[in-house]
Image (cartoon, rainbow, N blue to C red):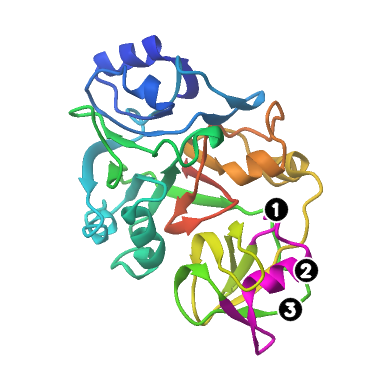
């Protein structure tokens, strides 16, 4: 079960003892009883008919009860290496972290270096808020065993699969590098003042404005040995200022800005056309795709889930769709 339900229907599933991950507005998650679940705040979702913005009476439910054996844990910002370290030998760690927290920043910077990070998959999402509440309300994650909520902690559902099943981690990235300048950065950071463009040191904000990219629609695309990983622009300071990013850039990686995508919904449908929702245990998509692709009311294919402030597939991703399919 991956669907948007009323608080009352979700509460009944919890009382029945089902093992769930949940997403919804804080006011909705606050109404849920304690039980076998973790959750995070977000009011945006992709459902079968397209993108929706949920009211306080709805939550999105991922039912993991029939997927595998599930156990729960949570980790402070200095304990995040334990997410992969304690993961099942065959399965995945479904993880939710609140946006803007120390845990979010440390996971983004360090996850790729955690022991077993690419052996014991970590997937999941970054909790957020309604865009109108940015700066006035903080994202939360929930440990449903006690109904405790946190502003700076990771909650995890460990899913151990039977021997005849495997978790396939699917990453759908609409963006490709353009054919222009190659950018390099000197340190791992969410905030950048200077970068090297074709070997020349420049102010990053000035460079972005000169290219007319300050709208933030196009991410940087890093080439990680052939894998393309996006880093999205959050805010671009005045010329000479700082550029804030939704994920960190890393030294030693070749970055270029992305080529434009004219039709997000159509591009997703094309990439997902050969698939359906069979076997999908979890999926999420990025809030920037939702906004810039105008996905509200537009169906994209057979995956449903929260629209998030960051996606996790081994490490933090931006402007990406992530799905876990059990095969």
Magenta-span inclusion, residue 196:
yes
Res 211 label:
2
Picture coordinates of residue 132, whole percent (x, y): 55, 33
Q: Callout 2: helix, strand or loop?
A: helix
Which residue is denoted by mark 3 in the rendering?
Answer: 181
Res 289 label:
none
Q: Earlier in the sequence, mark 1 or mark 2?
A: 2
Picture coordinates of residue 250, whole percent (x, y): 49, 74
Which residue is denoted by mark 1 in the rendering?
Answer: 217
Q: Which of the two residues, 215 or 309, is positioned nearer the viewer here? A: 215
Left or right: 160 as drawn, with respect to 28: left
Q: Residues within 10 Å of mark 2 (few under 14, many from 20)?
A: few
Picture coordinates of residue 78, whole percent (x, y): 22, 60
Q: Gap between marks 1 and 2, in whole Å?
A: 13 Å
Left or right: 278 as drawn, with respect to 263: left
Q: Earlier in the sequence, mark 3 or mark 2?
A: 3
Q: Gap between marks 3 and 2, in whole Å?
A: 11 Å
Picture coordinates of residue 207, whole percent (x, y): 70, 73
């Amino acid at each position: 079960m991956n669907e948007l339900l009323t608080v009352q229907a979700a509460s009944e599933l919890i009382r029945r003892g089902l093992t769930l991950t949940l997403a919804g507005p804080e006011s909705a998650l606050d109404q849920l009883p304690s039980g076998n679940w973790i959750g995070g705040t977000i009011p945006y979702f992709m459902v079968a008919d397209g993108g929706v913005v949920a009211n306080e009476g709805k939550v999105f439910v991922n039912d993991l009860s029939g997927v595998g054996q599930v156990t729960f844990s949570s980790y402070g910002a200095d304990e995040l290496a334990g997410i992969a370290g304690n993961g099942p030998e065959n399965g995945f760690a479904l993880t939710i972290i609140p946006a803007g927290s120390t845990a979010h920043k440390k996971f983004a910077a360090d996850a790729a270096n955690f022991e077993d990070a690419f052996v014991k998959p970590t997937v999941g999402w970054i909790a957020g808020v309604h865009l109108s509440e940015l700066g006035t309300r903080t994202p939360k994650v929930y440990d449903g065993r006690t109904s405790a909520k946190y502003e700076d902690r990771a909650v995890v559902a460990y899913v151990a699969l039977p021997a005849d099943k495997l978790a396939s981690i699917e990453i759908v990235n609409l963006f490709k590098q353009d054919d222009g300048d190659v950018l390099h950065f000197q340190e791992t950071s969410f905030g950048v003042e200077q970068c090297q463009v074709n070997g020349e040191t420049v102010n990053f904000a000035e460079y972005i404005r000169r290219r007319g990219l300050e709208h933030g629609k196009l991410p940087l695309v890093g080439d990680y040995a052939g894998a393309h990983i996006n880093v999205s622009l959050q805010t671009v300071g005045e010329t000479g200022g700082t550029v804030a990013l939704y994920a960190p850039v890393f030294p030693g990686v070749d970055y270029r800005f992305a080529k434009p995508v004219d039709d997000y919904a159509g591009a997703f449908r094309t990439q997902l056309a050969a698939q359906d929702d069979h076997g999908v245990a979890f999926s999420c998509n990025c809030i920037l795709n939702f906004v810039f692709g105008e996905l509200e009311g537009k169906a994209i294919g057979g995956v449903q889930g929260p629209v998030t402030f960051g996606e996790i597939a081994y490490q933090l991703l931006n402007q990406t769709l992530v799905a876990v399919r059990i095969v």
